[in-house]
Amino acid sequence: MPRRSDSATGLVIVACLSAGLGCEQIETQALEAGHHRLQLVVPAGWEHLDHGRQHLFRSGECQMSLVDMGIATQEGLVHDLQQAETLWRAGRREDAFARLRELRGPMLQEKSKDQVAEFWRPWAEVEDRPHPADSATVQAVFTALIEGTAIFPPVTAEDLTAYVLESRLDTKRYEIASQTPRPVSGAVWTEVETWDRVSHLARSRLAWTENGGYLLVLGVDRGPAEQVDAAFAALLTSIQVVPAAPAPR
């Protein structure tokens, strides 16, 4: 059931108006969106709902979302494979295999069918067996999958933008109107404005950044640009991404 965020408030910034009209308290919230630890300021007049991997911001009929979209690069893919292996070692075989089946990422898309098929080959051979594989075989599968991530070329910024757009938009109807790198508190976001391919209306905005091998995406879900743009810009520029800790060796 949706719940209003009561995340740790973090520090409180007091912004005094230079005109001497008083002081306005701006509360910075500390929260987690899936793999990402963040601090941000909810735009004035907007409601914040915390759904774990997804955070919603609402004002009337307008809505923005901040979402962990999962694996962005080989680093994230390796980390998810290691997590699945940890589940298997803990005796949670079905949970581990479910984690493998749920793997998604830009390097696992249809555009590289041969590479994807080669990557999944060790797992496919085990899944096709009529009887459960023994422990030695399963361990060999995890080892082969982790080593097999090297088969994929590095994921580019263009790959990630295409992946985000394909995941969030009807790309047959909408296209990129503009794309801008946006440094925010030490992180580099890619901010994209989209519009209808034919009319060049129905403008909308989204932005993404990569953190520790995972995608973090801020997007407008609904609402006219003239009502949402200012809040989107304010929310984006307030986000502080806490860098992911290095994976244990």
Image (cartoon, helix red, strand yellow):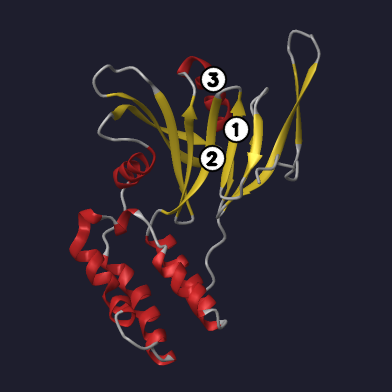
- Of residues 36 and 241, the one drawn nearer to the viewer in this rendering: 36
Q: Residue furthest front?
A: 130
**Distance from label 2 to label 3 (Cα)?**
16 Å
Residue corresponding to mark 3: 230
- Residue 206 occupies which quadrant of the picture? top left
On screen, residue 78 above or below 58:
below
Q: Does residue 239 appear in the picture of this structure?
A: no
Residue occupying the point 49% across, 22% down:
223
Lateral position of residue 42 relative to residue 219, left or right: right
The x, y position of residue 155, in whole percent, is 31, 53
On screen, residue 54 above or below 181:
below
Residue corresponding to mark 2: 66
Question: Disc 3 marks which amino acid?
Answer: Ala
Callout 2 secondary element: strand
The x, y position of residue 237, in whole percent, is 55, 31
The x, y position of residue 194, in whole percent, is 35, 27
The x, y position of residue 85, in whole percent, is 48, 77
Question: Disc 1 marks which amino acid?
Answer: Phe
Lateral position of residue 42 relative to residue 112, left or right: right
Q: Residue furthest left?
A: 114
Is the residue under label 1 in contact with that under label 2 (CB below 8 Å)?
A: yes
First-in-chain label (2 vs 1): 1
Disc number for residue 175: none
Residue corresponding to mark 1: 57
